[in-house]
Image: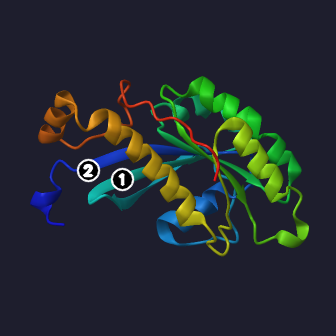
C-alpha cells in the first residue's frame, strides 16, 4: 500500500498484558513483536511497550502492547498503565495454579482502572510444559466462559498460538471501533487531519468482551 493510499488509514490501539510475575508476559510480547524468546528473561521493572503493525481489512493497525511487572512491589504503576487500553491479555502459567487463581483479581483491577470497555483474552501460557501442567484446559475454558472472555493456550517458547491470541484481540478492537466510529463525521474529519490515536481518546468506542472459543 502506497503512502498516499495509506494516508488517514492508520489506527493505534493500546493493549495491556497483565498477570502474575513470571507467567511469560514479556516473552509473549517479544515473540509476537520480534519473533524472539529469551531463556534468561528477567522480571520486568516498570513499564515497557512494543508496537506491532497488523493489516486488517486493508487498513494499517498499530498495536501498542504494554508489559509491566506482575510483582506486588511494582503495582503502583498500574493506574496509568491501564488508562486508554482497548484490549488486554490476562496471562497465567498453566504449571502454577496460584497464577490462575490470581486471574479474577487481575480482572477486577483491569475493570477498576480502565476508562473504556476492553476486549479481553484469557491466556494460559507455557502449554509446551504439558508434563507438569497444574491447570487443565477445561478449567481455563470454564473461567473464560464465566467471565465472558476469549480463551487460548499459548507457548512463547515454541510460538504456539501467540500471533493468533494477539490478532484475535486486535481484530475484536478494530471491529468494535469500526462499527461505532468509522461512519461518524467527526471521526472522518479527524482522520483527514492527522493520524488516529485511540490510546488517549476518552470518548473512544466501547468494545465489549466476547465469549470464549
Question: Please, what secondary structure does the residue beneath circle 1 have?
Answer: strand
Q: According to the image, label 1 marks what residue?
A: 62
Residue 10 marker: 2
Q: Return the residue nearer the eye: 212 or 40.
A: 212
Mark 2 crowd level (few <14, some 14–19, many ≥20, 10 Å Cα)? some
Looking at this view, name the residue that lies furthest to the bottom.
158
Report x, y in % for residue 192: 12, 40
Q: Residues within 10 Å of mark 1 (few under 14, many from 20)?
A: some
Q: Are marks 2 and 1 in contact (CB under 8 Å)?
A: yes
Decide which of tag 2 and tag 1 comes sooner along the chain.
2
**Marks 2/1: CA–CA distance:** 7 Å
- The residue lying at 45 percent from left, 33 percent from top is 84
Element type at mark 2? strand
Residue 72 visible somewhere in the drawing: no
Quarter location, residue 152: bottom right
Q: Is residue 161 visible?
A: yes
Spot occupied by residue 186 in the image (x, y as percentages of width and height): 18, 28
Is residue 67 left or right of 190 when viewed as pictured? Answer: right
Left or right of 33 in this view: 165: right
Displayed quadrant of residue 58: bottom left
Q: Quadrant of the N terminus?
A: bottom left
Q: Residue at x 56, y 38 (%)?
A: 209
Amino acid at each position: 500500500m502506497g503512502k498516499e493510499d495509506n494516508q488517514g488509514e492508520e489506527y493505534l490501539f493500546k493493549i495491556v498484558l497483565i498477570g502474575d510475575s513470571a507467567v511469560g508476559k514479556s516473552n509473549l510480547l517479544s515473540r509476537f513483536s520480534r519473533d524472539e524468546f529469551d531463556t534468561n528473561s528477567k522480571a520486568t521493572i516498570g513499564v515497557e511497550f512494543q508496537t506491532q503493525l497488523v493489516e486488517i481489512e486493508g487498513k494499517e493497525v498499530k498495536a501498542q502492547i504494554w508489559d509491566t511487572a506482575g510483582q506486588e512491589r511494582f503495582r503502583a504503576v498500574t493506574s496509568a498503565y491501564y488508562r486508554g487500553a482497548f484490549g488486554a491479555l490476562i496471562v497465567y502459567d498453566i504449571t502454577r495454579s496460584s497464577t490462575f487463581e490470581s486471574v479474577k483479581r487481575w480482572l477486577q483491577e483491569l475493570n477498576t482502572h480502565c476508562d473504556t470497555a476492553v476486549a479481553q483474552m484469557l491466556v494460559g501460557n507455557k502449554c509446551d510444559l504439558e508434563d507438569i501442567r497444574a491447570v487443565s484446559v477445561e478449567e481455563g475454558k470454564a473461567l473464560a466462559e464465566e467471565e465472558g472472555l476469549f480463551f487460548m493456550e499459548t507457548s512463547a517458547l515454541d510460538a504456539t498460538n501467540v500471533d493468533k491470541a494477539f490478532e484475535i484481540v486486535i481484530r475484536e478492537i478494530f471491529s468494535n471501533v469500526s462499527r461505532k466510529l468509522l461512519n461518524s463525521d467527526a471521526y472522518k474529519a479527524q482522520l483527514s487531519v492527522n493520524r488516529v490515536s485511540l490510546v488517549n481518546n476518552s470518548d473512544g468506542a466501547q468494545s465489549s468482551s466476547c465469549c470464549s472459543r
